[in-house]
Image (cartoon, grey):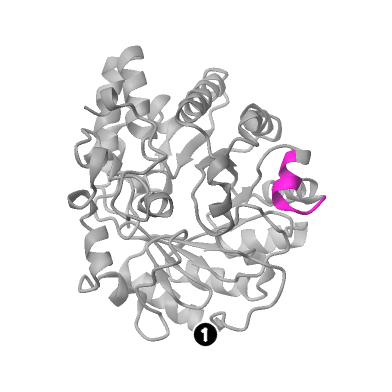
Amino acid sequence: MIGISKLYCGTVEPSDALRYERHSSKLPSHLLQFSKDKHPVVVWNVTRRCNLKCVHCYAHARDESFSNELTTEQGKQLIDDLADFGVPVILFSGGEPLIRKDLPELAHYAVEKGLRAVISTNGTLIPPETAKILKDIGLSYVGISLDGMEAINDRFRGVKGAFKAALEGIENCRNAGIKVGLRFTVNRFNVDQIPNIFNLLREMDIPRACFYHLVYAGRGSSLVQEDLSHEEARASVDLIMDLTRRLHDEGRPKEILTVDNHADGPYLYLRLLKENPQRAKEVLELLEMNEGNSSGIGIGCVSWDGEVYADQFWRHHSFGNIKNRPFSEIWTDTTEPLMKKLKEKKRHVTGRCARCRWLEICGGNFRVRAEAVTGDVWAPDPACYLTDKEIA
């Protein structure tokens, strides 16, 4: 996760994170990526059921009931363990988490336990009364997925009317006083929609947007050929930086992040090195705090059936099930070979990753994407768009 507004527009300084001693329990949410203890943010896919049919769904979600989902009581036991373990944030995801009837109860329980609770949703199931419930629970944030304007979004979401319903959900959250943001997965079909997303941020006064690079997992595995080329990826990151700066200069700053390609960090630094060398120096310090990809370290996933994964995309390798052992025990068990290697992944990457000068601030980028394309979990991430000259 690369904070474009934080780094490029200077809304965060190294001293901001150092003031809290970089402890995740003390850091405000916008500084969590700079923590030094790296207690994991945990994504809990509370259900596999979804009312939409997204073409890039990593969970292969469908609109049908599944019998193997964790019960309410098992969910509360998980939350107890996460709280005791020092997890700073629990992200309720799916499928579509709002389909699960006990979600408000589970989210409220998490907040009572001292966790920051956020929801990742398609936004189509948030009438005013639901928004009020979510506000009363004390949710920190609601992230709503959009993949462009109406025609493009509804094509990706597989259901006509999804765009309009999501906009209503956004408005209802704003009216209820909940911080809300957009989640946008970039690919060749919708990269031209990025300016429209920024216009939406401006028009609806939405404070945050995350632009996700495509990960080849779930139904997204079939979209490898639709991912951006290296040149297109560079151009899209430049565009995101330009539009973020424009809003900042207009006096309408937004929190803008790019996610799932840690080449964005060095790329941003190299651009700043030409434009503002003093700021570039500060950004490099922040990127070193960030440490790049954190799968198996600073982010983890619990599936609807209790299986524990390195992140929400890595569903072909489970480290165990919380029905049998607590998450905290599974997460710290380095007798599991892959878990051990992920926690020291910089020692195991090969090829250009191993000799890259940005390894310490990229963390080897996305291992699951490398494995999906090459069959080798330690091979270079094919989505890294930095040139050989830039990494030398």
Q: Is 123 left or right of 278, judged from the image as shown?
A: right
Where in the figure is residue 115, as x and y percent of width and height?
43, 64
Where in the figure is residue 269, as x and y percent of width and height?
32, 25
- Report the span colored magenta: 152-160
As drawn, the residue found furthest toward the right would be 161
Q: Which residue is mark 1?
A: 73
Which residue: 56% across, 63% down? 59
Disc 1 is placed on an element classified as helix
Residue 352 sits above or below residue 388 on the image: below
Q: Amino acid at mark 1?
A: Glu
Q: Quadrant for the C terminus, please.
A: top left
Where in the figure is residue 322, as x and y percent of width and height?
40, 80
Q: Quadrant of residue 126?
A: bottom right
Residue 392 sits above or below residue 77 on the image: above
Q: In terms of depth relative to the viewer, which is nearer, 334 or 132?
A: 334
Where in the figure is residue 157, as x and y percent of width and height?
71, 51
Q: Quadrant of residue 291?
A: top left
Q: Is residue 382 visible?
A: yes
